[in-house]
Amino acid sequence: MNLLLPAFLAAGALIGLPILLHLLRRQPKQPVPFPSLRFLGPAALRDTRRQRILRWLTLLARCLVILLVAFAFARPFWPPARKGADRAVIVLVDNSFSMQAAGRNTSLATWLSRQLANLHRPDRLGVLLLHPTPAWLVPLGDDLAAGRAALRNLPTGYESSRFQPGIALAAAVLANTPAEHRQIILASDEQRLGWTGTDFAQPLPPGVELLTAPPAAPPARQAALTRLKITRTPDGTLHFDGTVRAFAPAVSKRAISFFADGKPLGGSVLELAAGAAQPLRAEFKLPPATPIFTVYASLDADDLTADDTAYAALPAEGERRVLLAPAAAGSETDYLAGALAAVRGGDLPSFRTAPLPVNAPWPSAAAVVLRGPAPFAEKSAAALDVLLQSGGSAWLLCDGSSAQSDWLARHGVSVKPIHAPAAGLTLRDLDLEHPLFAPFAGQSLAPLLTPAFTQGWSLSGAAVEPLARWPDRTAAIAEVAVSAGRLLVTGFDDRRETSTFPVQAAFVPFAHQAVVWLAGNDRASATSGRVGEALTLPGAGVWSVLNSPVAAAPLAVNGNVTPAAPGLYEFHGPGAPRRLYAINLDPEESDLSPWPAPADFDRLVSRKKPAPLALAADREAARARPADESSVWWWLLAAAALLLCAELGLANRTTP
């Protein structure tokens, strides 16, 4: 044991004061006449001896109190058990989901405990988490207990790690640390993906060492469900389309199970070959009216269970429809409704045509077709704005009505009538790369260029993206960004009185594709994403978990959210319909292959000698800090307080 302030020991000389007081109490013996003591018996003699012993104990307690207080103020401490130079260690923790493979965390914890076993004050320890970006769990400091506790209670991660940013940050911190030995310990399975992008030609600062864990043992059994897509037909059939990638062993059989809204649908057995992607297809017939919102598929468990499940989400069957505004008054034939009803096969059968609700919210998963002034009345216009704010889609067919023009003007779109020659207007300059014209890609464009329009409106504005133009090069068909939604505007309507388009061969495929494209808006209904990627949400609301390996309380969000775990989620905002999200893992992380050239790690250590440390005073202060912050003196003061209480009790019993 050493003393930080040994001069305070001189205060121990104060023990002479209670000794002096004790001696002063002793008086010379004088004979006092007294009657015979023989009748008092031996009890009187014993009481006299007891008083004498108590007085000596009181003196001893007083002396010990003074010595303990003086010793406490001298600040005793035990120097570090280890002799030699001090160390500064930063542990980089790989928290990617590949670390959940069987046995990896256990073997890594055993290896790491051996590396940190010799850390004692004044050594310093820091813990740095690698994903999604390097973040300190415990900043570099002398609180070794906090660092070790953090390593025992690491959070479970479901993203991929990249080692380069964490190594660079740790090296920069250690380069300015007053320690003779500075070391980075990479607690990882040395996965190939983590080292991708590392510049091995750029060494660490001189004097900074890098210690990497031994490569993890290869998995005995590993496959991943890397993709899952679900479609549903009007007859109630669910079609599963996915991909399974096998890694080990060379040939294996895996059982896969399918679930809808948490209930099992059935399963099958797959024959897999390592290194190959196996297509996955299955279908299950359900009653047409069965509501299905969430589905997932799961492989039987292997060495890495995190990637054995993939999720998908579907909007409600009732929401997958076309909401059609009424035709113009006086129209003898509703050509647009007929065109949608005429389609058989392809994608459209999964949607039903229904009238546009008048006094009810419009489902964001539906494709809304706006015609005439009725959809722009007060209540309907409010429902339309909510639809677009929540990521919904609409097709607006211009007819020049003031209600339409005013609503478009509020959203940055100017509508002007265009002069039509006697032969009529025709479309030109079509954006054939846009999905709207997918049925005509690689085919003749004549069906789209042939219709003649006797009445048309040009579209302009900052939010207008032209998809087709009139002969005067103004926009005739445009996509317009409105809030989070998708809006298709055509500078013509579907009346036979204003064009020949409704009776042309191109009208049916054009109307069909417009509805399919709008209804396929991922932002409007079920949406997929990956763990760690930010999702754009249609405003404020509540984000909650439906099915995930990690339980989480509902979260209030505003505009965006970054899921930290895979699963099925829902978002519900005020005045907006429920929206479902399927979040899956990055399939690249499922490949557990180690970095093929471990010798590259040695290239990161600089061969140059470190410059002399200019912070010698800081180093000495760092060494002295553990002694200064030692808690031994508090125990000494506590012992002195207890002795003082005992002394008071003894003194009361010896007082005449």
Image: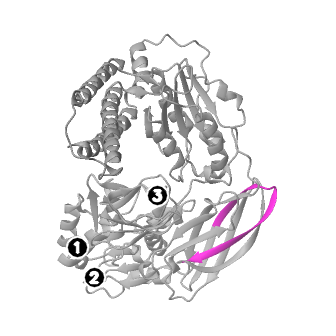
Tag 3: amino acid: His
Q: Secondary structure at mark 3?
A: loop
Give coordinates of residue 159: x percent, y percent: 53, 50
486 shown above or below 187: below
Q: How many marks?
A: 3
Q: How is the image coloured?
A: one colour
Name the secondary structure under disc 2: loop
Residue that badge 1 annotates: 381
The residue carrying mark 3 is: 434
Count residues near mark 3 (Cα–Cα under 10 Å), then give few for <14, some for 14-19, many for 20+: few
Q: Nearer the viewer, mark 1 or mark 2?
A: 2
SS assignment at label 1: helix
- Sequence order check, earlier mark of 3 and 1: 1
Q: CA distance from mark 1 to mark 2?
A: 12 Å
Q: Quadrant of residue 379?
A: bottom left
Question: What is the C-alpha distance between the residues marked 3 and 2?
Answer: 32 Å
As shown in the figure, which amino acid type bears the numbered disc 2? Ala
Q: Which residues are magenta?
A: 242-260
- Circles 3, 2 touching at the beta carbon (< 8 Å): no
